[in-house]
Amino acid sequence: MKSLIHTMLAIVIACGLLAFVAAKLDATNAAGGKDTLVVYNWGEYIDPSLIDQFEEETGISVIYETYDSNEAMLTKIRQGGSAYDVVVPSEYTIETMIEEDLLIEIDHSKLPNLQNIDPYFLDLPFDPKNKYSIPYFWGTVGVVYNPKDIPEHITFDSWDDLWDPALKNKVFLVDGAREVIGLGLNSLGYSLNSRDDNELKEALEKLKKLNGNVKAIIGDEITPLMINNEATVAVTFSGQAADMMFENEELNYAVPSEGSNLWFDNMVIPKTSLNVEGAHQFINFMLNAEVASQNTDYVGYAIPNKAAWELLDDEVVNDERFYPREESRTNLEVYENLGLELLGTYNEYFLEFKMSLQ
Amino acid sequence: MKFKSKGAFLPYLLWIALFVIAPIGLVLYYSMLNLNGEFTLGNYKNFFTSAYLAMTLTSFWYAFLITFFTLIISYPTAYLLTKTKHKHLWLMLIIIPSWINLLLKTYAFIGIFGLYGPVNAIMNLLGFDPTQILFTDFSFVFVAVYIFIPFMIIPIFNALDKMNPSLIYASRDLGASPLTTFRRVIVPLTIQGVKSGIQVTFIPALSLFMITRLIAGNKVITLGTAIEQQFLVAQNWGMGSTIAVFLILIMFAIMVFTRTKKKGGRA
């Protein structure tokens, strides 16, 4: 009997300790309130010195956390228990969050700097009138490549260049179902939001012919490989391409003319926020022209802030690879929220594509 | 007396119910739900009609390769270890790397196998052209084998170490050749260690997923990759659970296949 009591006691003590630690952890997690602001953003997606500047200007102390996928972020917000005040999801995730009633409406009167944003990036279909979200960065999906290592006739003006036999074992793809199936659809002239199963199957069949050319399908690991000249051609996001080109000047970036993805990351205030006032202050701060231009210098993605364009180098803003002109944006499409069923189909076809690779 | 022994089991029973039976039950339950949370067997139908069946086979094939090479390397290593003077020190040295985080070791291999990494530098010295070793079947199996070797060596080492050496002398005295001694005496006496080694290698190898992306560049797809994608990207918990159910079934089959037979000792 004694040993039983001891065991029980040990378990109770262990549970107590765990509960205490959990409560402690929760406390740091939910430390939101009047003088703190919890910002939840993508990794490497803000100039850290701007956070210090914001803290100095407002007296609000910022807790900064990062995520690496919209889905991971969404799961965390859905489950509650967090106290995030500002989050930066991509457009199709914003649509989902609005549908699921996870966001607070943004009070535009508290954002005098909103006028700095180019009107092209406002009032978009995923969030009409910007009721819930304010533009942060935008960009495209394209091909980053090293012109030295491939024949001259390959310029990636067309997605079909990826199928060129000269690129045997040289092509790296980003590990995303929407991006890869999307480029297959685009190369056939279809919309990358296609809901037609025949079109998707056709795209899959075409992608399977990439077999000999694809070296690997990976994520962020591609950046060091491109920088060190270990990889030659990579389908990736424009901002990541900008990072690589900053480190390795031999590289070039192209968005194929058949069309590609145009994406936006916007700032939103989730319902979990405990400091809505501070969240507005933070968003307004990020919209400030000087702040935005400094942030662009650091992050490397394209900024939708036209007041910041004046402050940035002409070389940056006039680089059509990263700031495509409005007329050439007509072939670019924004991801629509396809719904889970269709997203599942995209993913299944993507898996099938991966399995066909040897 | 009886009450006491029953009561002592209570914490374990609670533990098993909470952390073994309940999760398996939940996986089974979720596997029968579709995206709208309705009850269906559609996920199972999907499993048999789509790419998942082929994926199960490739997973199986790679897990087999990994286990096979791990065993081929580990058995002689364990045998030689038992012959060394400071065998426990050597064993320790082999085990220590397994304390390092798996992901960290995997990232290290990206550098080692890289075009400008040490392996290619040596190849270059020997007069070969540098080749990209990463993102091939070879690199995948190599890294996986490297990771599993300590787990295979430990049970085999223990089995060999426990073996009574006089049995080997007896076998030799009775005129058996070294090969016969190995086949008829050493192998039967250590087969339990080999079986445990296969269990701890084959089963995790079936569901490896980070290495498939970092080292094999997603050209090798295992059931683990598919489960990860269904839960995190497609957010289809039903399908993810269905694949998990099949993974559990396969693991169960492996356990039965490599189970300890009661009638041993016929050596």
Image (cartoon, coloured by chain):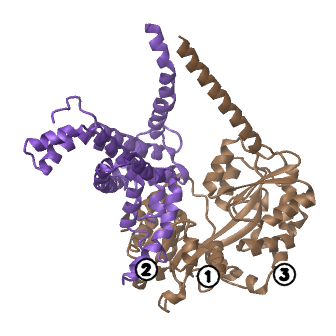
Mark 2 or 1 closer to N-term?
Answer: 2
Crowdedness near tag 1: few (<14), some (14–19) or many (≥20) residues, C-alpha within 10 Å: some
Q: Is residue B20 above or below residue B185?
A: above
Task: Single out the residue that lies furthest toward the left.
Answer: B175
Query: Chain letter for purple?
Result: B
Q: Is residue A161 above or below residue B235?
A: below
Callout 1: SS: loop
- At label 2, the amino acid type is Trp
Q: CA distance from mark 3 to mark 1?
A: 26 Å
Number of marks present in the image shown: 3
Q: Is residue B175 visible?
A: yes
* Letter of the chain that mark 3 sits on in the rendering: A
Mark number displayed over residue A314:
none
Q: Which quarter of the picture shows residue A283?
A: bottom right
- At label 3, the amino acid type is Glu
Instruction: Name which residue lies at 54% across and 54% down.
Output: B233
Crowdedness near tag 3: few (<14), some (14–19) or many (≥20) residues, C-alpha within 10 Å: few
Front residue of B208 and B120: B120
Instruction: Name which residue lies at 40% across and 55% down.
Output: B222
Q: Which quarter of the picture shows residue A255?
A: bottom right
Mark 2 or 3 closer to N-term?
Answer: 2
Front residue of A220 and B267: B267
Question: Which image quadrant: the C terminus of chain B?
Answer: top left
Q: Residue tagged by mark 2?
A: A163
Instruction: Name which residue lies at 61% across and 20% down.
Output: A9
Q: CA distance from mark 2 to mark 3?
A: 40 Å
Q: Residue tagged by mark 1?
A: A248
* Letter of the chain that mark 2 sits on in the rendering: A
Q: Nearer the viewer, mark 3 or mark 1?
A: 1
Q: Nearer the viewer, mark 2 or mark 1?
A: 1
Mark 3 or 1 closer to N-term?
Answer: 1
Q: Residue tagged by mark 3?
A: A310
